[in-house]
Each structure stands twice: as structure tokens, then as C-alpha cells.
Image: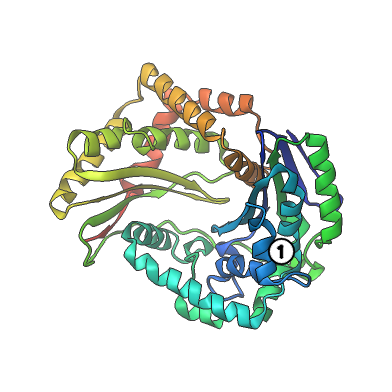
Amino acid sequence: MIQSSLNNGLRYAVRSYGNAVGYCSLSIKVGTRHEEGFHSGIAHFLEHTLFKGTSHKTSAAINNTLERLGGELNAYTTKEEIVLHATVLKKDLAKAASLLLEIASDAQFPEDEIEVEKGVVIDEIASYKDFPAEEIYDLFEEKLFEGHPLSKPILGTEESVRAISSDELKRFCRKFFTADRMVLSMVSPLPEADMVKMVEKIAAKAGIPAQGTAENAQEAAAKQEAILERRHFCQSIRKDNNEVNCVMGGYAPSLEAEEERIAAILLCNMLGGPSSNSMLGSILREKHGWVYNVECNYTPYSDSGVVAISFGCDRDNLKKCTAAIHRQLAKLLSAPVSEKKLAAAKRQILGQNAIGMENGEAQCLSMGKSILCFGQVPDDEQVVSRIMSVTAEQLHKTARELFCKENINTLIFN
């Protein structure tokens, strides 16, 4: 892997991997939490409308550029980043990367196109009502971070989306779509030196501004982030759904707290990771059949994080499920796990990570996020070392911090 930066501040990472397919992504350090001074949901709406035309390509031309070659073009928005990514045959990688940078640097946001897209996004907002497992998690974070930029819903509201204009989208781009906030990643069978030359050529042609205006820089330096006030809640909301949905959890380590973050990742994977032998999965699903699925997710942000246990069940099983979860948490809080269990947990998560990273797209997206968050992509040895260095005592300390009574908030759709 080669990772470096260009003179304008654009960072990049390239890795030679695979046989016939190439992947590229453009990660931009801006998301829902950066929307102050703009309508709520503008980051997500901008992600939708970036593809609606540039100075040189219409919306139809953008869609056809890669799809007629058998490729795919996509994007997503989080609370702290917007990511554009593409999958193509290796010979078309330059076209894909060039298109991503053209979209990011020259989107025109035609009024007629964005009016059509408003209907799409508003329908997406409405559709969340049909997915209570997703709706409840979003509401849980809104309550947990109330009064802080992290509380904002990614999709915005119907009213806020209707109010977004082409001029506002352009202003948002001018402020945040700059080279110093971007990472271009590539994974393909091509030689890494060739991909570096490709990055240099494409970036020079795109003409992305190096950084925001001096006025924006001064504004950002002067503005202080809202202080996160810790909250505690236990709330049940009546819903006419067939099953009950529940989220239990609280605050967790930020991206910057490396030791605590790695311990939290390992702990949550043990408790409610994707395998059926997780502590909660083995009890709630495999032994009793009370739930179809139960998860323990950890989401780190730049200055905080969220740990959340989530499940859906029949109303008659809600008390049984919550009681079983509290019993499992009590075990984690009472004493450190045995060295045997810790070693098994480490082997499992390292295996899951290795298998997941066999996917070229997953590699590409992970590379972009790592540079955006940490300034570099760790190599395989570093990843293994960080996991293997977690001790039973560290895991116990993390469990006491994450799952103590004061940090357990509960939200139920009943």
C-alpha cells in the first residue's frame, strides 16, 4: 500500500489487490454534525444531488458513464462524513476516479433536478416509519446527544428538505468540499505506482480548492464545539407495530481514545457481534428463541461515541429479554473474563476482520475512513497488535464504564 498527499492537501491511499475489478472512493470530512447555518439534512441531500449534473455532464451522462461499462456508482452520508464510491473493471478505474472528483468539485445542482430529488428524499424519510429498528436507533441518538450537533437526524425533516435551494447546496460545497478535507482511495490489480500517477493526473485536472476561504478558517477556529451534556433517560413510546423494539446503551469512547476504543470494539463483538455464539445471541435467540436478532453496536465519533444493544421481540418477551440482558451485563461487570475466553474472542474478531477485508470494496472504504479519522491506514500487523494487546483488566474496566447503571439509557417502541 502507498499512502501520501498531494501539494493541495488531498490525501490518498492505493493498494494493489484482486484480479479484474477496481474500487475507488472519495471520503469527505463533513456530515450531519456540520450543518449549523444550513437546513437540517443538507449533507445527506447534497449526497443525493451531487450526481445531478456538472458543467460538462448531465445527470443522465453521469449515470451512464460507469453503468454502461458494467460499473456501479454510489454514495452515503454519516454524521461526520460523505463518501462517494465506485466499482468498475480495472481498465476503467481512471474514469471512475475522475468522475468522483468531477462530481465533488463541479456539481451544479440544477433547480429542476433538485426539486425532483426532494420527493425521493422525503419519501425516504417517510419510509423510516416502516422500519422501526432503524427509526428507534436514530431517535435514541437524538435523545442521547440532545443539544449537541451529533443529535441531528441524518435525513433531516420534510420541512427542512423542502427549504434547501441550489444556492445553499453550492455554499455548503464551497465551505466543506476542499482538498484538505478529502481522501481518495483505490484498490485494484494495477501496480501501485501506476495508481499513484493516476491520482496525481486526475486531481490536477479536477482543480479542487486546497482549503476553505480565510474567512471560513477564522470562523472555524473561533467557533467552539457545543459541550456534550450527559443525559439519562428511560422512555417507552407507543407504536402500532407487530413487535416491540428496544435500544439500551449510552456513551462510549471517541475515535481519539485508542486503547478504550479497541477494548470497546472487542467487548461489543463478544456481547452482541454478528456470530450466533455471542453472549446475547446465544441466550436470547439460540437458547430461548425470544428474538430474531440481537446486536451490540459501538459507533465512535470524533469527540464521543455510542454503545447500543438493540433487539425486537414479541411483547410478551420484552421483560424476559431485558432481564436476560441485564444478567449478562452483570457478569461482565462482576469480574474480568478468563484468559481462555479472551483469547477466543480475539481469535474470532481477527478472523472476522480478515475475512471482511478480503472484499476489495470494504478495503477501499476502510482505507479512506482510516486516513480521514487517524491520518493513516494501519497495516495488518498493527491491527493484530492492537487487538492482542487488550488485557482482561482493560476489558473489565471498559465494561464497567460502558454498562454501569448510570450509562444505561433505554428507549422502547411498545
Q: Residue furthest left?
A: 316
Q: Viewed as shown, does residue 39 lie left or right of 134?
A: right
Q: Quadrant of the C terminus?
A: bottom left
**283 or 250: nearer the viewer:** 283
Q: Residue at x 59, y 57 (%)?
A: 74
**11 or 202: nearer the viewer:** 202
Q: Is residue 144 above or below residue 187?
A: below
Q: Residue at x 45, y 22 (%)?
A: 347
Spot occupied by residue 163 in the image (x, y as percentages of width and height): 55, 82
Spot occupied by residue 257 in the image (x, y as percentages of width and height): 56, 40
Q: Colour scheme of this structure image?
A: rainbow
Spot occupied by residue 412 in the image (x, y as percentages of width and height): 26, 58
Q: Residue 233's image quarter?
A: bottom left
- From this viewpoint, is residue 28 visible? no
Q: Is residue 165 above or below residue 344?
A: below
Pointer 1: what residue? 103
